[in-house]
Amino acid sequence: MPKIKWSRFIWNVFHVKNKEQAEHYITEISKKYKDATHNCFAYTYWANINFDLFWNLDITADSTRQSDDWEPANTAGKPILAQIQGQNLHNVLLIITRYFGWTLLWVWWLIQAYWECAKQTILQAKIQEIELTETKQISFEYENMSLVMNLLNKYNAKITNENHGNFANISFEINKWFLDSFSSELIDLSKGKIKI
């Protein structure tokens, strides 16, 4: 809980999946610190995952929101969001609560205070992006081997086990966000012969 020019700052960080979850946490923190002068925040979450023309992964931020909560415009929410985006984090809500210390902070001091609080929060919380994977298995005729291997490679799937008999059987781990696209493309390219 740092103090800057007698103002006291408290930070809270949450993993959020959508807007509703973020707004729920914002409401809870606002109730918890209802006597605070400001509860400033920023959040971002993503859900849209695509591939561009060159098969590069393209993740687009579905939503970002920031609030200065009656601080001067762009002195709190914007620096908080800049730190979240600067660390390339997604699905993160960061709320910084300020108790006024009876010393006015000039705009530059406010920006620096919220910037530094957001930075320290991210460092101390040790926020990391993790990949959520699912393990799947497919069985197919050997004539489709190159098709399957190309798709597994395209979606960065990791082969965990292979069995070769009358049919090829492959177990693999794949990012859960890619699973629907992978499955759809596998069915299309194999003309319905291979399914997960």
Image (cartoon, rainbow, N blue to C red):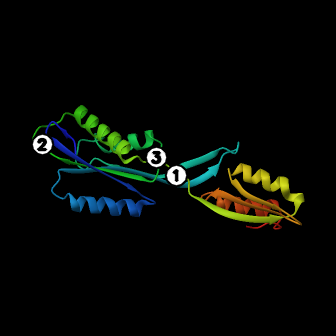
Residue at image location 66% in from the left, 58% down from the top: 173
Q: Tag on residue 130?
A: 1
In which image quadrant can residue 75 be found?
top left
Q: Residues within 10 Å of mark 3 (few under 14, many from 20)?
A: some
Identify the mark nearer the N-term, 3 or 2: 3
Check disc 1: other Cα within 10 Å, few if <14, some if 14-19, many if 20+: few
Looking at the picture, tell me which residue is in the foreground, 45 or 152: 152
Q: Amino acid at mark 3?
A: Leu
First-in-chain label (3 vs 1): 3
Mark 3: which secondary structure?
loop
Which disc number belongs to residue 95?
none
- 93 lies above or below 110: below
Q: Residue at x 22, y 41 (%)?
A: 2
Asked whether, in this view, residue 190 is left or right of residue 71, the answer is right
Mark 3 and mark 2 residues within 8 Å of each other at the beta carbon: no
| Distance CA(mark 1)–CA(mark 2) | 39 Å
Residue occupying image coordinates x 42% and y 48%: 127
Is residue 23 placed above or below 154 in the rendered structure? below
* Amino acid on which the number 2 mark rests in the picture: Gly
Residue 125: x, y in percent?
37, 48
Q: In which quadrant of the rendered image does the N terminus lie? A: top left
Label total for image: 3
* Residue in the foreground of this view, choosing between 156 and 83: 156
Which residue lies under the disc numbered 2? Answer: 101
Q: Amino acid at mark 1?
A: Ile
Q: Position of residue 106 (x, y in %)?
A: 19, 33
Residue placed under numbered mark 3 in the picture: 89
